[in-house]
Image (cartoon, helix red, strand yellow):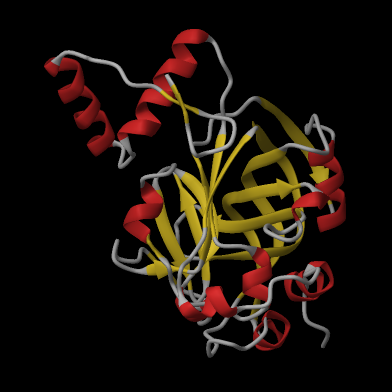
Amino acid sequence: MAKSNIPGSQTLSINISESLYEALQKRALENTQTIDHVVQDSLAKALGVEHHTLYQVSTSAALVQGVYQGCVTVGKIKEHGNFGLGTYDELDGEGLMLDGHVYQALGNGSVIEPADSASAPFWVSAEFEADRNTVIDSVSSWEELCAQIDLLRRSENLFTAIRIDGVFDEIHYRVACKSAPGTDLVTATSHQAEFTLKNITGTLLGFWSPTYARTFNIPGYHLHLLSGDHQHGGHVLGIQAKNLKLQVMDADNLIMALPESPGFLKADLSGDPALALSKAEGAQKK
């Protein structure tokens, strides 16, 4: 066993039979995952170890500075989980991944499944496996929903993956519109498209990130909507609903892939992006 170049992990070299290796390759191919992921997941289950990993591409600070050039393909994203969210090249809509399928919510209100060759400048993925679940009887606002999820989180210092299924009496969401590279995030989202739907079945998916992560992730709650018919989706701003199934997963392992694009390498990422993120993530003032 040798020390890995990834903090908190080890490199293990072993000999396995040809049949086991072929089975690993087959499982990885079937689930569009890496062999490393299949091995870690299998070992964790066999040894009774809870090991939930987030795979993140780029940083929130880079987005704030307008670094929107795609740096990872949808095909690559699928190798690192079955659940997640992000955005697309030039901030062209909202990204969603649910049950292994990746979707793109566009500014015109439609939702498509992009080709594996499509690229994203920012993404967070996970293999979702709930640690805890409950039923939310009723919520009448975004703030109330966040307070209800708070009751199921177990730490202010761990990341949390969140899935909520049900019928939404009313849901307000936005979709980022395509912007020129270099346009800061607050300016780019000042002309975002906003939508309100009533009595729609769907799923909210996303993450809660600790305050200390504000320079590389979006602190607090970040949830996207995908309707049950996969025709509507976007970044959630407001909600009214009853009898929602809430599932959460603690994430205690973070892997980050940083772009090597000229825009990222030259960007000034030394500032605190929290204020700009708060403005960009909220609804626009009418």
Q: Position of residue 208 (x, y in %)?
A: 72, 47
Q: Position of residue 173 (x, y in %)?
A: 67, 68
Q: Could you tell me which residue is drawn at 54 percent across and 10 percent down?
A: 48
Closer-to-camera residue (273/126): 273
Closer-to-camera residue (35/134): 35
Q: Is residue 51 above or below residue 184?
A: above
Q: Could you tell me which residue is drawn at 70 percent across and 41 percent down?
A: 159
Numbered disc total: 0
On the rendered image, what quadrant is the C terminus found in?
A: bottom right
- As drawn, the residue found furthest toward the front would be 2
Q: Quadrant of residue 238?
A: bottom right
Q: Is residue 240 above or below residue 51?
A: below
On the rendered image, what quadrant is the N terminus found in?
A: top left
Residue 67 seen by the camera: no
Q: Could you tell me which residue is drawn at 54 percent across and 56 percent down?
A: 85
Q: Is residue 58 above or below residue 109?
A: above
Q: Position of residue 233 (x, y in %)?
A: 55, 64
- As drawn, the residue found furthest toward the top would be 47
Q: Is residue 174 above or below residue 148?
A: below
Q: Quadrant of residue 266?
A: bottom right
Q: Is residue 252 left or right of residue 110?
A: right
Q: Could you tell me which residue is drawn at 47 percent across and 15 percent down?
A: 45
Residue 74 seen by the camera: yes
Closer-to-camera residue (151/56): 56
Q: Position of residue 225 (x, y in %)?
A: 59, 58
